[in-house]
Image (spheres, helix red, strand yellow):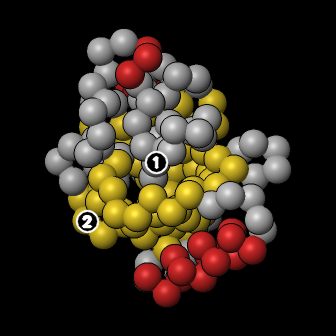
């Protein structure tokens, strides 16, 4: 089954967790010092926030899937849209190991299609220590304005 994904960049993780927990009526399913995620069933959405983005607001959108077959189906649809799909393959991002592909829609909004396989202890397998603003981007391909994941 597919789940819609939204990732929002925030400045203050604690204030944002408090706000979204109140809005959604539940605490995050994953909470780190720089990241939080809610896996909601109604509506069926994976809503994530982090301080790992250069800008606040919607960072990227995506479709999370449960199976390799669903990921292949969505990736093939993206390729048919002829927008230059970047097949990232297996990666670690947002405290999860995932298999993913990226594309930017005609308006330039980054989208990811991905299957999460396991939780991870690190935010990313890329060298992304948040020591200054130039190093805050994390997971998206270099040619994408997105900087994170789901």
- Is 73 drawn above or below residue 21 in the view shown? below
Kindly indicate whether the residue at mark 2 contacts the one at mark 1 (C-beta within 8 angstroms): no
Q: Residue at (68%, 70%) from the top-left corner?
A: 79
- Residue 136: where, in percent of width, then height? 41, 24
With 12 as the anchor, is 117 left or right in this view? left
- What count of labels does the image hold? 2
Which numbered disc flags the more N-terminal residue, 1 or 2? Answer: 2
- Residue 9: where, in percent of width, then height? 53, 31
SS under mark 1: loop
Q: Residue 149 carries which label?
A: 1
- Is 128 drawn above or below residue 89 in the view shown? above
Q: What is the residue that sits farthest to the bottom in this orientation?
A: 69
Label 2, on which residue? 118
- Residue 93: where, in percent of width, then height? 34, 48
Q: Residue 139 carries which label?
A: none
With 147 as the anchor, is 117 left or right in this view? left
- Is 56 drawn above or below residue 37 in the view shown? above
Q: Residue at (45%, 52%) from the top-left corner?
A: 150
Q: Can residue 24 be seen in this view?
A: no
Between 54 and 85, the residue placed more toward the observer is: 85
- Residue 115: where, in percent of width, then height? 42, 70
SS under mark 2: strand
Q: Residue at (51%, 63%) from the top-left corner?
A: 87
Between 64 and 84, the residue placed more toward the observer is: 84
- Is 113 drawn above or below residue 55 in the view shown? below
């Amino acid at each position: 089954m597919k789940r819609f994904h939204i990732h929002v960049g925030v400045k203050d993780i604690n204030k944002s967790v408090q706000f979204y927990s109140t809005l959604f009526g539940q605490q995050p399913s994953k909470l780190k010092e720089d990241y939080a995620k809610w896996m909601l069933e109604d509506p069926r959405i994976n809503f994530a926030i982090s301080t790992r983005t250069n800008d606040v607001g919607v960072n990227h959108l995506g479709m999370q899937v449960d199976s390799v077959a669903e990921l292949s189906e969505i990736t093939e649809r993206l390729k048919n849209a002829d927008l230059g799909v970047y097949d990232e393959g297996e990666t670690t991002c947002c405290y999860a190991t995932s298999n993913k592909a990226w594309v930017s829609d005609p308006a330039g909004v980054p989208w990811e299609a991905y299957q999460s396989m396991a939780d991870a202890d690190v935010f990313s397998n890329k060298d992304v220590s948040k020591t200054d603003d130039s190093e805050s981007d994390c997971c998206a391909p270099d040619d994408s304005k997105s900087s994170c994941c789901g």
